[in-house]
Amino acid sequence: MSLAGESESMERLANREPRRIDFSPDRLNLMQITKMVGSHCDDTHTAFRTEPPLTKEVLDCAVTHFFPAGLGDMFSTKDGLLMVARVGIPNSTVQDYARYLTSAEMKVRKQQATDGKKRQDGLQDRANESGLPLE
C-alpha cells in the first residue's frame, strides 16, 4: 500500500462513527432484588421481591449454574419471590444473589430464543416438504 493509500485509510478510521451500544429495554432488563417482603418472612426464611418476578425456571438455572455449590437447597420461589432459608443476610450477599439471578435470566432467555428458532426452522422444513407455505 502506498503512503497516500495508508493516509487515506487512517483518515477514514478517524472520521468513522463510534460504535453504538444497544440500550433497548430487553438489553438492560436485569434481575433486581427490590425489597424484602416481611409478610413472607419467618424465623428461618427471608423473602425478597425481584423485578422481573422470579420464575422456577430461572431459579433452577441459577442454582445449577451460578450459585456456589451446596447452597441450592436454601433457595426456593413462591409467588414470584425469592425465598432464602436464612436470616441476617448482608447487602453484599443480596447483591451476589441478584448477580446470579441475572446471569441465569440471561441464560434462560438465550436458550428460549434458540429453542424458538429451532422450532420455527423445523416447521419451515415441514412446510417446504409438504409444498405448502407456512402460516
Image (spheres, rainbow, N blue to C red):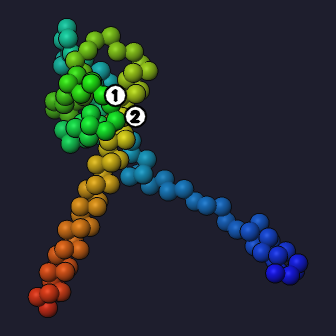
Q: For the view shown, which residue lies furthest in the right direction? A: 3
Foreground pick, 84 / 68: 68
Type of amino acid under label 1 = Pro
Residue for badge 2: 99
Residue 30, percent from left and from top: 39, 41
Mark 2 crowd level (few <14, some 14–19, many ≥20, 10 Å Cα): some
Question: Could you tell me which residue is drawn at 39 percent across and 15 percent down?
Answer: 90
Q: Specify the quadrant of the image occupied by residue 4.
A: bottom right
Question: Nearer the observer, disc 2 or disc 1?
Answer: 1
Q: In this view, does 9 lie above or below 41?
A: below
Q: Which residue lies furthest to the front in this view?
A: 69
Return the disc, 2 or 1, that comes first in the chain's sequence: 1
Observer-nearest of 40 and 119: 119
Which labelled disc corresponds to residue 68? 1
Along the horizontal axis of the image, is 65 left or right of 126?
right
Residue 133, quarter of the rendered image: bottom left
Check the image and report above or below for 120 versus 62. below
Measuring from the top left, give residue 54's x and y in whole percent.
24, 37
Secondary structure at numbered mark 2: helix
| Residue under the image location 35 percent in, 47 percent down | 106
Which label sits on residue 91? none
Residue farthest along the top direction in this orientation: 43
> In percent of the image, x 22 and y 38: which residue is there?
60
**At which x and y percent is residue 115?**
23, 61
Going by the numbered disc 2, the residue's amino acid type is: Arg
Q: How many marks are shown on the rendered structure?
A: 2
Which residue is nearer to you in this view: 79 or 68?
68
Q: Can residue 54 be seen in this view?
A: no
